[in-house]
Amino acid sequence: MTGAGGPDTRWTLAIDHGTTTTLGAWADIEPRDGWVRVGAVIVDGAPSMPSAVLSRPDGAVLAGRPALEAGALDPSTALLRTRPHLAASTGGPPELLTHWPRPTTAVDVATALIATVIRAEAGRRGTLPSAVVLLHPAWWSTPAREALRAAGLAALSAIPRTSPDQLELLDAPRAAAHRLGGQGRLLVVDIGGAATELAVVDRAGDGTGTVAAVRSVNVGAEVLDDALAQLVLDRAPPPLAARVRFGGDLEAHRAWFRLRTAVREAKESLAASGSVAIALPVLPPENPVPGIVGLSHTDLGGMLAPGLEEIAQGITALVGTLTGPRPAMLVRGGLAEMPRVREWLAERTGFGLAHGGDPGAVSTSGPASGAAAWAAERLGLGRR
């Protein structure tokens, strides 16, 4: 949409600070037809970054993949999976996560990740966003949401010519529903890193929505990664496994850090292949040369099955409290990319899948792109 002053250059940004990964999505106007378009923010060459932050002794703060890579040398300095600390916020003083090299809190970590995403897209465009939306689970308490807001405000305050009025918060189920579109009730199943959020969203015809019911199930990708890493150690030479599990020294911590990272990446590869080889960490004298341990779909399925059953039971319990027609179901999150996870949940619960072949609706950036489009519409960007 253009006017007398030329093309509308405003754009919006949404950031999803997850337990395992953080990603951003933008929305702006397609100059050829005036419609709102969305896309992923690229940070360090990738559409997502690890939710990792590391403070170096010289005071420099690393966020994302550089922090994860630096943490492999000294795992005690890397802060990982800190979003659950935000979720547990009670409104009191921020909980200290570490004292080295300086006090760090979950709010500090979220600030570094949010600022990294903002700077990446603003640097690419050469302009600042008109609005920044931060996503959060629908079940988060008011103090938890305010902790996230504090992180967003801190990130904006470090960037000249930004305003606190640019910041908004939106729950992830409504953002995911907005990306999918349509009307009526939608059951959003989001299998995250720390837990699975189940939410029923009532979608209105004007693009807004309300959360009618929400429930959290303690099944997430991080628990699976831990279990798979332990399975790899079960198959590793016993001296190496014992050293990694019980050594307690720096080299043992480094070995566990590298193994855990390798398992997470291997799990993603299993979605497209029947088996994957994981290189064991080199840890003299127990393991002076690299070794290999294989994981298969059978291994993954055996560990996924109990968690999926727990999610199915949670779905039945949540929707059983509601009246009216059965909602369609949108299943997303990292574990949803595993073979037949969506189909199994649909068959087990009797709910039809809602994404209708739209890969964007179930992609990792689905809620973030929905939130960016939501903010763009609120600003009046694009055709009306």
Image: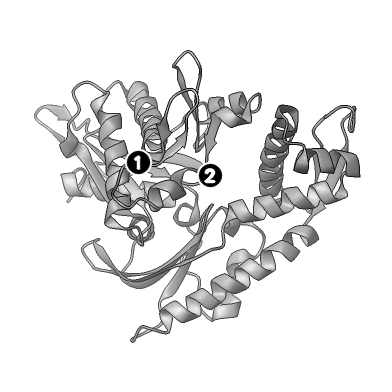
Whether residue 272 is visible here, answered yes or no, is yes
**Which residue lies at the image location 53% right of the left edge and 63% below the top edge?**
218
* 343 vs 124: above or below: below
* 201 vs 261: above or below: below
Whether residue 273 is visible here, answered yes or no, is no
* 222 vs 265: above or below: below
Q: Could you classify mark 1 by the number of other residues whose Cα lies within 10 Å: few (under 14), some (14-19), or many (20 or more)?
A: some
**Percent position of residue 253, x then y:** 70, 34
Disc 2 vs disc 1: which is toward the camera?
1
Can you identify the residue that label 2 sits on?
20
**Which residue lies at the image location 20% right of the left edge and 37% below the top edge?**
166
Q: How is the image coloured?
A: one colour
**Percent position of residue 123, x then y:** 35, 21
**On the rendered structure, is 102 left or right of 289?**
left
The amino acid pointed to by label 1 is: Pro
* 361 vs 115: above or below: below
Can you identify the residue that label 1 sits on?
94
Q: Secondary structure at mark 1?
A: loop
